[in-house]
Image (cartoon, rainbow, N blue to C red):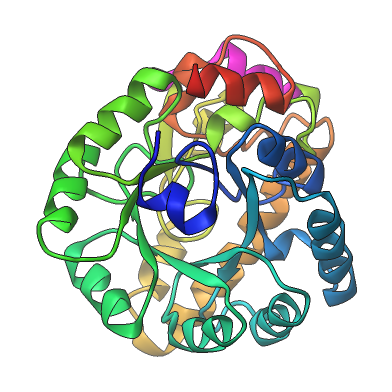
């Protein structure tokens, strides 16, 4: 399964274990690397820069041939830790960085100085061309089947649209839960895939057994979009609690979001409230179950070790 992604990262299979807030950790990534794929963790999963530094050291020490690791950076102003996180990543070294929600220019410039590849989340051709012009090594094409914050185009439409109009590799994100899905994305023209939701139900994931079991019990038809987490539409499992609170922003948020001066602060407050609710649901038993996931949980049949999930995806 040699593609431009396997060549870029020196991995056996063209798969990135997607970075997932609260879920991803070093144990998952180490097992992913052993399975011949790349693993990625959101830098925001670490409260302090020292914790992030220790995680990088652990992954560098555990790195094996045929696997690689990276970190996801939120590169807009909402992430007050961004510059410090980028500095630590460049000092300690990793194979790649995935940027989200902002301009990747500074990240690309700093990372390339120390030999770190930079892949950028995009949802359309306009932004894909921008990151290509800035020197990105690949575009992560986030489609309308992705978990969490997703795009608006189908995998086939987005991959082909980007493939025909940019020269950097296209990595498809969303809608992959089994080997057949990977084959489909590669057929459309992707050089690899980013897979997240199937790994929520891994034994190594840092979330409750209830969250993991929900990914087994629910399926694609149980995924809904909500504005109640970050202010931006996000996919979650349609639990009774989600049904109770609704998926639309409150009338007050709706009014305030129309005010240009207040809109940024409203989103920041909603993001903070939503992330706290998501963290509580993911890490402790609570009836307030706001569990982020994508439709690819359709193929999740049991809670398994990461190595077994990787094996299911590649064989």
- Residue 184, quarter of picture: top left
Viewer-proximal residue among 202 and 288: 202
Most common secondary structure along the magenta stretch: helix
Residue 72: horizontal and vertical position, in percent? 59, 63
Residue 34: horizontal and vertical position, in percent? 71, 35
- Residue 253, quarter of picture: bottom left
* Magenta stretch, residue numbers: 210-220
Quarter of the image for the N terminus: give it: top left
Left or right: residue 71 versus residue 2 is right
154 is higher (above) or lower (below) than 260:
above
Viewer-proximal residue among 165 and 251: 165
Q: Is residue 219 magenta?
A: yes
Residue occupying image coordinates x 57% and y 64%: 96
Residue 73: horizontal and vertical position, in percent? 59, 69
Residue occupying image coordinates x 49% and y 36%: 13
Viewer-proximal residue among 115 and 83: 115
Left or right: residue 256 versus residue 217 is left
């Amino acid at each position: 399964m040699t593609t431009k992604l396997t060549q870029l990262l020196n991995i056996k299979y063209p798969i990135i274990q997607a970075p997932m807030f609260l879920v991803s950790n070093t144990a998952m990534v180490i097992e992913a690397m052993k399975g011949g794929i790349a693993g990625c963790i959101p830098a925001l999963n670490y409260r302090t820069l020292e914790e992030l530094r220790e995680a990088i050291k652990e992954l560098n020490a555990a790195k094996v041939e045929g696997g690689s690791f990276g970190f996801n950076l939120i590169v807009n102003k909402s992430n007050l830790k961004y510059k410090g996180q980028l500095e630590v990543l460049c000092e300690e070294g990793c194979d790649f960085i995935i940027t989200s929600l902002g301009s990747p220019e500074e990240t690309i410039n700093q990372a390339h100085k120390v030999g770190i590849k930079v892949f950028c989340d995009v949802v359309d051709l306009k932004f894909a061309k921008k990151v290509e012009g800035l020197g990105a090594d690949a575009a992560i094409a986030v489609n309308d089947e992705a978990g969490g914050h997703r795009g608006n185009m189908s995998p086939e439409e987005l991959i082909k649209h980007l493939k025909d109009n940019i020269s950097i590799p296209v990595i498809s994100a969303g809608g992959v839960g089994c080997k057949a899905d990977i084959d489909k994305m590669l057929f459309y023209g992707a050089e690899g895939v980013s897979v997240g939701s199937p790994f929520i139900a891994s034994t190594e994931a840092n979330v409750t057994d209830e969250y993991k079991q929900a990914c087994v019990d629910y399926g694609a038809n149980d995924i809904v979009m909500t504005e109640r987490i970050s202010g931006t539409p996000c996919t979650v499992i349609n639990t009774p609690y989600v049904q109770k609170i609704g998926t639309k922003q409150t009338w007050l948020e709706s009014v305030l979001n129309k005010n240009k001066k207040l809109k940024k602060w409203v989103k920041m407050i909603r993001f903070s409230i939503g992330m706290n609710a998501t963290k509580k649901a993911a890490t402790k038993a609570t009836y307030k179950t706001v569990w982020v996931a994508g439709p690819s949980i359709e193929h999740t049949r049991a809670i398994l070790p990461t190595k077994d999930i990787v094996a299911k995806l590649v064989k």
